[in-house]
Image (spheres, grey):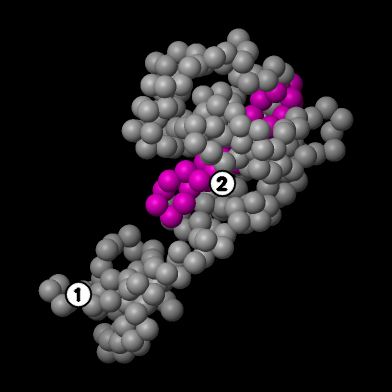
C-alpha cells in the first residue's frame, strides 16, 4: 500500500524501481515483488519503452469512485463545526454554480446579534468574500470570460464595480490565500473566506467566517489562520496536496 500511495503523492507521472526503493527504504527485490502484485490487479502499469511504472486503470477507477461518492457537505461538516466553535461566529460552506455562488451549509452561533445566511440562493462571483475567493482561484480564461460578460452592479457603497480594481483584488486574494469582505454585499456584515481545492488544484468550494462588522474587525487576525487550516483540511480530503 505504501508503494501504491507513493504514486499518488509523488507528483510524477511515472516512477522507477530505484526511486521507489530509495524513497520507501525497502530493497529493490521487495519493490519488484510488490509491483508485480499490483500489476496483476491493474493498479500499476509498466511502460516497456522507459522501463518505468505508472498508475493503472484500476487505481484511477478507485479514485473516480471515491470522488463520485463524496458529499462535500458531509465531508466539510466537522471542520465547519470546529471552526464555528473556535471563532464563536457563523461559518459557511459555498459552492460555485456556473456564474454564481450559493451557500450550501452553515454553522450559526448563539449570539443574539449574528450573521445568518440563506442556503441555495445564487449570488454573483464578484461581491463578498466567498464569491471573490472562488472567482480568484478559477483559471485565467474563466475569469476573463466572467468579467467580459458580467455587469458589476453595486450592492453597497463597498462593492467593487471596476473591472480593473476587481482584477487587482483577485490577484491579491490568490497571493495571500484568502478574501475579505467588509460590507460589500450586505451593510454591517463582514467575512473572510478561503478556497477548498480538489486534487488538481481546482477550486471546489469556499469556507468562510462571517460576523457583524463590529465584532469582525478586531478579530480578523485571529480568524485567518483558523480559517486557512480548516480549508486545507477539507482540501486534503479531496486529494489536494499543495
Residue sitting nearer the eye, 32 or 198: 198
In terms of image quadrants, where is residue 226? Answer: top right
Q: Earlier in the sequence, mark 1 or mark 2?
A: 1
Label 2 residue SS: helix
Q: Is residue 208 visible?
A: no
Q: Which mark is residue 231?
A: 2
On-image quarter of the N terminus: bottom left
Tell me where residue 85 appears, x and y as whole percent: 75, 46
Q: Which residue is mark 1?
A: 47
Tell me where residue 73 appears, x and y as whole percent: 64, 51
Tell me where residue 98 appears, x and y as whole percent: 49, 36
**Which callout, 1 or 2, points to the residue nearer the camera?**
1
Magenta residues (range): 189-215
Q: CA distance from mark 1 to mark 2?
A: 37 Å
Residue 193 lies in magenta, yes or no?
Answer: yes
In terms of image quadrants, where is residue 207? Answer: top right
Amino acid at each position: 500500500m505504501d508503494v501504491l500511495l507513493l504514486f499518488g503523492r509523488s507528483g510524477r507521472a511515472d516512477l522507477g524501481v530505484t526511486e521507489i526503493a530509495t524513497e520507501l527504504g525497502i530493497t529493490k527485490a521487495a519493490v519488484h515483488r510488490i509491483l508485480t502484485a499490483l500489476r496483476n490487479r491493474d493498479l500499476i502499469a509498466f511502460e516497456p519503452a522507459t522501463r518505468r511504472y505508472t498508475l493503472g486503470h484500476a487505481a484511477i477507477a478507485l479514485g473516480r469512485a471515491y470522488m463520485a461518492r463524496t458529499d462535500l457537505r458531509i465531508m466539510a461538516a466537522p471542520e465547519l463545526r470546529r471552526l464555528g466553535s473556535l471563532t464563536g461566529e457563523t461559518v459557511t460552506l459555498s459552492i460555485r454554480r456556473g456564474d454564481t455562488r450559493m451557500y450550501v451549509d452553515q454553522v450559526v452561533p448563539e449570539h443574539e446579534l449574528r450573521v445568518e445566511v440563506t442556503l441555495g440562493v445564487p449570488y454573483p462571483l464578484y461581491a463578498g468574500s466567498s464569491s471573490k475567493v472562488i472567482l480568484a482561484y478559477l483559471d485565467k480564461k474563466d475569469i476573463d470570460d466572467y468579467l467580459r460578460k458580467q455587469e458589476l452592479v453595486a450592492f453597497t457603497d463597498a462593492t467593487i464595480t471596476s473591472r480593473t480594481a476587481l482584477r487587482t483584488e483577485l490577484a491579491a486574494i490568490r497571493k495571500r490565500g484568502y478574501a475579505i469582505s467588509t460590507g460589500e454585499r450586505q451593510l454591517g456584515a463582514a467575512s473572510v473566506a478561503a478556497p477548498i481545492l480538489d486534487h488538481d488544484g481546482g477550486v471546489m468550494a469556499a469556507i468562510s467566517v462571517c460576523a457583524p462588522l463590529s465584532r469582525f474587525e478586531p478579530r480578523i487576525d485571529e480568524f485567518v489562520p483558523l480559517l486557512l487550516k480548516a480549508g486545507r483540511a477539507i482540501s486534503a480530503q479531496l486529494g489536494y496536496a499543495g
